[in-house]
Image (cartoon, rainbow, N blue to C red):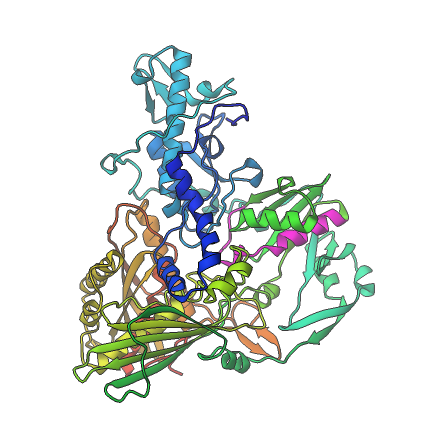
Amino acid sequence: MKEKMGSKRKRMKRRKFLKYSGVGIGLMLGATWLGRNPLRRAVFDLGETMLPPYVGNTSPLVWLQVSQKNEIILHSSKVEMGQGTFTSLAQLAAEELEIGFDKIKVVHAASISGNVDGFSTGGSTSIATLWNPMREMAATMREMLKAKAAEKLGIDIADLSVTKDCKISSGTKEISFGEIVEGVADWYIPETPVLKDASKFQYIGKPLARVDLNDKVFGAPIFGMDASYPDMLYASVLRSQLVDAKMSNFDFSEAENMPGVVKIVSENGFVGVVAKSQIEAEAARQKIKFDYKVNKDWSLADVEKAITVGNGTKTVFQKVGKAIDEKDKKSELVRMEFRSPIGAHAQIEPSGAVANYKDGKVEIKISTQVVNITRKEVAKALGISKEDVNIIPTFLGGGFGRRLHTPNAIEAAIMSRAVGKPVKSFFSRKQEFQNDTFRPPSHHVMQARLSDKGEILALEHSIAGGDTAFNSALVPFSIVKPIIRADIGSIRGGAINYDGIPNHRGTYYHVDLPFATSFWRSLGLLSNAFAIESFMDELAIKTKQDPIQMRLNYIKDENPYHARLKKVISTCAEKAGYTDEVVNGRAMGFAATIDAGTPCAQVVEVSIVDNEIKVHKVTAVMDCGLAVNPDQVKAQVEGCICMGISAAMFEKMDLRDNMLHPTIYGPYEMALMRDSPKEIDVHLIQGVDVPMPVGEPPLGPIGAAIGNAVRRLTGRRLVEMPLSLG
């Protein structure tokens, strides 16, 4: 079913036009007014909870197709990177189409289809932003099929209903979806029907099995690494092993004569070896001689010195009441510092792409979170129209923000054009570690003023960090950066949620680093929550207060997000049976955060074994609104907790002599099965009747919760990640 240019098309309602066009208008107004600090802070506050609208094609004829097997093929503009998006979208579509869930097959939409996401797959927004659009498209498609069936059967549409096996029946006559669409060239798209009431849901809210389960269990070739073309060549790109250095004076003479080499491509700022096999391409690339021009010698100590509160560009992103006066002697000043390290993505599948350039057009198979941006960047680099670039997304062998940057697509396309054949180009594992877009390190200063009665009179959080969002092609930060100044990714989760404290503020210091840093799952949430929630726990100990009740006392009910946070906090403490006491060598630690409008609280049970921290159990409570697939949501929470344990207790990149280390798994320590808690108890609360973000909010509390438990066990406050007693 394809929509023709001459077909009757549903007009966009004025209400929807205002809703979606408001995004662009907001950016335009922002460029004019955000230089004013109060408005800056208002935008930062909004960014903590606001969900962006879905920006993309919402024609049912682009998203939904009737196949020859009489099933619905859903062409998703959101990519599947393990988060379960395909399954939840299938549930939404099946619900409003009123067909069997097993009758929907979900595939990635190629950019040539016209179904291109204007934003990306990221920010935990896929299902939350498509909650209404996907159901509206499915309901509209249902009515389109019924109307055409009524026409073909000669029956009034009011007498027709949809059956589970993709047929439309009157009781005495029926016609399959396949028969309905046969020979139809033009479709009339009606006004959007009334959507189902939640009380009638058959699939939404049910723990249905994943639609991609079989392919992944049985190892189907669905990932970017599996992509291929007939008569394909292989490439290995030369990448700098040093930071803050430039390669020059290339000597290709030895590399050109290596076995299997087809061509060495030096173009557009990169050098790549194209050969008949991957091994031959790698071997030849290692024979290229060149010189380094080092700008400055860097070590990890230099980075930590640069990433220190007080350095860089200062922006106050939260301001309520008065600032803390360090010279004021009327109340007690409590001050602590925290640090987080450089973090790698370390995803299983390295970055890469397969490109096929032919007759002025190029097709690229790639693991990407940003189909639209990848298409635009390739078109610009090759000097062709974006309509002549077809991006075919694959399943992702780990995303976590790493796939928001896809210069590898440009490289593969240029090399394919140079040799006149398809080219497959992937990072080696060493390159993936050394040339990652890392999670930036951070430094935090927490300060509080306490009354003689133990009341928190003021609380301040100061952050120093590198680029998170500013270094991304996701949005035009070259325009926005000078205006908003504070990196909206680095300050994510950095605001003080305890609005009952009369004076509180957040300040950010942006520092440029000599290596690429960018989005990493949950952005700044993990490190910011580590600082804030560890400090709140220390204040509770210092003032001899129950850490749960103290938090609840400083959260107002007026803000609906904070009211949901309070419920999550109290429920989590209750479900875990939280206590401050050390019992049988184990202690509990508590922490809570709210991210993108989704509050989450966690209690960990920890012991010390051979001077190492052992996490035994995590109790998690999250309010993500309506859970489309509760099992998938719980799996996401469990995954976030395990990833958070890995980041908080093990992961750290080093920098020595301008070179980032480690470059392989093993030396880059990550949590293993033995480090995972034996029990993760997840409870979901539905505080609102729509889906809210799921994929990143549960990462926030875990680092602080572990640190808080260790504090009770040992009396030591751990202030640096990865957490260690050594």
Where residue 513 sits: x, y (%)?
Answer: 55, 72
Q: Residue furthest top?
A: 154
Q: Residue at x 68, y 76 (%)?
A: 294
- Judged left or right of residue 150, residue 555 is left
- Judged left or right of residue 686, residue 269 is right
Of 289 and 614, the residue lying toward us: 289
Q: Is residue 164 above or below residue 671?
A: above
Whether the magenta-drawn stretch holds residue 18 is answered as no
Q: Residue at x 33, y 85 (%)?
A: 326
Q: Is residue 164 above or below residue 355?
A: above
- Judged left or right of residue 362, residue 579 is left
Number of marks in picture? 0
Q: Quadrant of the C terminus?
A: bottom left
Give residue 639's quadrant in the image: bottom left
Q: Which residues are magenta?
A: 394-418
Where residue 42 sits: x, y (%)?
Answer: 36, 61
Where residue 175 sits: x, y (%)?
Answer: 40, 17
Q: Residue at x 69, y 58 (%)?
A: 236
Of 612 and 534, the residue lying toward us: 534
Whether the magenta-drawn stretch holds residue 416 is answered as yes
Could you tell me if residue 420 is visible in this image?
yes
Which SS does the magenta portion mostly show?
helix
Q: Is residue 558 above or below residue 384?
A: below
Q: Residue at x 52, y 20 (%)?
A: 185
Where residue 695 sits: x, y (%)?
Answer: 38, 55
- Judged left or right of residue 659, residue 419 is right
Could you tell me if residue 585 is visible in this image?
no
